[in-house]
Image: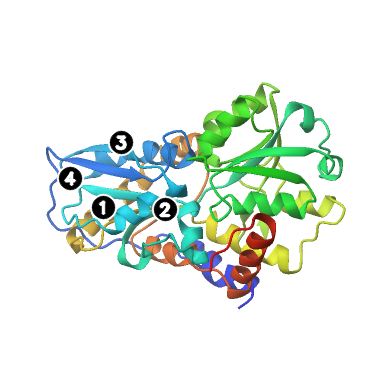
Amino acid sequence: MTVSTFTRRAVVGLIAAAGIAAPAAAEVDFSGKTIEWVIPFSETGGSAKWANFFAPLLAEELPGNPTVVVKFMPGAGSTKGANWFQEQDYDDGTLLFGTSGSTQFPYLLGDPRVRYEYKDWNPVMASGTGGVAYLNAEDGAKFDGSANGLKDVDFIYGSQGATRLDLVPLLAWQMLGMNVEPVFGIKGRGDGRLMFERGEATIDYQTSSGYLKGSAEMVAAGDAVAMMSWGALDADGSIVRDPTFPDIPTFKEVCEATDGCETNGEAWDAWRAFFVAGFPVQKLAFLPAGTPQEVIDTYTTAFQAVVARADFADISSKRVGKYQVFTGTDAQSALGTATSVPDEAKAFVTNWLQEAYGVSLN
């Protein structure tokens, strides 16, 4: 299946189908209880900001108004936390787990460290996001909408790992002909931003929530220069400007303006496939295997009530960006989108990881 076909069938169809009603929830009461929402990254990244945004809103809508506490379990680019969650057996709804593309990608690529199975978990909410890459002020002065003036610069980038969501920017920068040296091992994208702020890194990218909360201030102050977003998908499956960052060009636009960068062929198809898997449906909230259906239904109803709030569009756009939120059966469909890429894209990325970074997944 081509990436174009995959995009149309999986993502565009999903977005068009949004709004299916949730089943009625049975009597479930969380009065006096504490719900732990575990995020497998550090507390400084986009996933932390995503969960911290939704947690108090969820608490207001769950019956009994429980306390929802966000906890962090960073390590191995989120694989540590996901492996832990796989072993949990909570059936009372007091444990929620959040993933991102950095959890999906090792699963998609068959990383041997992965001991978790998405099909065992119960998705109750999923949301899309975007991402913005930016440069330090000195190198940003050389950016003219193309990467032609950046090809002789040696960049340093703080990375969670080549098999994580970072493969999207790393592959994009390589396609642009840029020399970006990743420093692997950070625990979250927020740690990468801190490296950039301290001058230890000279290029960075953040998902939308992380960029809105921290990086946008650096750009506004002139301490950084926004280079490109990854874009968004329109109803035809074409990459267009991210609605949260309409003034920032997409990678596709920068690639088209850069000598030697092509928006067709194997590299482009692979980049696009992993962009589709990693961003239009990037962050998901799960209940563990074995959770009773009435608890799943209760969470579905609560998340739907959150999205239906009159002020949701306004407050979410400022904290996590202007992206689709999926609940109920749509969340299950979203999971399928986030955990599927064509075999050709997997093969290309697997070979690229070996050649570029010596990362073997065999």
Eyeballing the image, is 194 above or below 68?
above
Q: Earlier in the sequence, mark 1 or mark 4?
A: 4
The secondary structure type at the circle numbered 1 is: helix
Amino acid type, callout 4: Pro
**Residue type, mark 3 in image:** Pro
Q: Secondary structure at mark 4?
A: loop
Location of residue 294 in the rendering, given as x and y in whole percent from the top left corner? 18, 60
The amino acid on which the numbered mark 1 sits, given as a three-letter code, is Tyr
Q: Nearer the viewer, residue 343 or 332?
A: 343
Of badges 2 and 3, the one in the foreground is: 2
Would residue 282 be seen by someone viewing this image from the given angle?
A: no
* Residue 79, label in figure: 2
In the rendered image, the vertical position of residue 92 relative to residue 110, given as above or below: above
* Helix, strand or loop at mark 2: helix
Name the residue that disc number 3 marks. Answer: 56
Residue 63: mark in rendering: 4
Judged from the image, the secondary structure of the residue bearing numbered disc 3 is: helix
Q: Residues within 10 Å of mark 2 (few under 14, many from 20)?
A: many
The CA distance from mark 1 to mark 4 is 9 Å
In the depicted view, which residue is nearer to us: 148 or 319?
148
Question: The N terminus lies in which quarter of the figure?
Answer: bottom right
